[in-house]
Image (cartoon, rainbow, N blue to C red):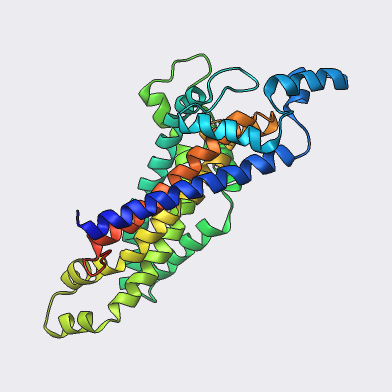
Amino acid sequence: MTRGLARYIAKRLGFAALMLVGVSLILFTLMRLAPGGPEAVLIGGEFSQEVAAQIRHRLGLDRPLLVQYGTWALAAARGDLGRSFKTGDPVATLILDRLGPTLQLTGAALVLALVVAVPLGVLAAVRRDTLWDTLASAVSLFGVSFPSFWLGIMLILLFSEALHLLPPSGVSEYGHEADLAARLRHAVLPTLTLGLIQMAAFMRFTRSSLLEVLRQDYVRTARAKGVPGGRVIWRHALRNGLIPVVTVVGLSLPTLVGGAVLTETVFAWPGIGRLAVGAVFERDYPVIMGVNLLVATIVIAANLLTDLAYCLIDPRISYA
């Protein structure tokens, strides 16, 4: 690692810490200013103002906003994200229990999207204005035109209700243990739902980026020297053509996580997205803040890794 790159990483890490503080402060403030509160959910019926005041005092919600945020931020810096208002369980434990299923779902969707999208994008660029290009563009347009929750419902209706090929929700059959085979079968539809949306975007960027590279002088020179077409594509054009795609993959992480929230809700997938949706409805502030802090950290880390990946792909880029 060069000194310039080390300084760049240190600068980005400092900026990331400031970003996390800013994002957490904004979310904390908006959450406290939102109408309603956890006391109505905790009591679950009619209650007097005195009872509500006692609950808010017990939860520390009657203290000044900055004091509440400062207390939460100092504890979070030590790794303590508090306890759930509803269950009393540590938030970190709740998140860790749900992190595995979410990583499985988003990771499988990302791999599926890249494995399908990059070859399709290359094929569409190389076979421009042919039937292959038209079919690939149609698939891409289909993928970006429909929201994930609608696509998920359509897949359930087709493969579960009409064809009875795949289970519609959960990670295992009711009353049975979630073994590997059951998890794989239950993961097919949510992975397809999440992956198809990302695949469409990746394929469009791969096609447009490769078309731009194929117009460059060095590609025309290689062809004029008699270099075979396949070698021109795979050894000269594709590497430069994938640089913008790497950026898109990194920046797509927030979209992937956001799509996972809806997808997990549609398919009753026991991940962080479903945990966050339940916490929002139950006004479970510590859980909401814990999930948001985790998502913000992942997004900032992904952006940093995207920038660093440029060094490996394009040696012309220097951080000195």
- Name the residue nearer the viewer: 308 or 121: 308
> Residue 233 in the image: x percent, y percent?
22, 70
**Residue 312 vs residue 299: left or right?**
left
- Name the residue nearer the viewer: 113 or 174: 113
Is 219 located above or below residue 57 in the figure? below
The residue lying furthest to the top in this view is: 175
**Residue 1 vs residue 180: left or right?**
left
Is 5 located above or below residue 25 in the figure? below
> Residue 165 in the image: x percent, y percent?
48, 33
- Name the residue nearer the viewer: 270 or 179: 270
Whether residue 164 is visible = no
| Number of numbered tags placed on the structure image | 0
Residue at horizontal 19%, vertical 53%? 1
**Residue 272 vs residue 46: left or right?**
left
- Name the residue nearer the viewer: 104 or 44: 44
Q: Quadrant of residue 120?
A: bottom left
> Residue 250 in the image: x percent, y percent?
40, 54
Residue at horizontal 44%, vertical 34%? 187
Quadrant into which the C terminus falls = bottom left
Whether residue 234 is visible = yes
Residue at horizontal 74%, vertical 22%? 57
> Residue 298 in the image: x percent, y percent?
43, 44
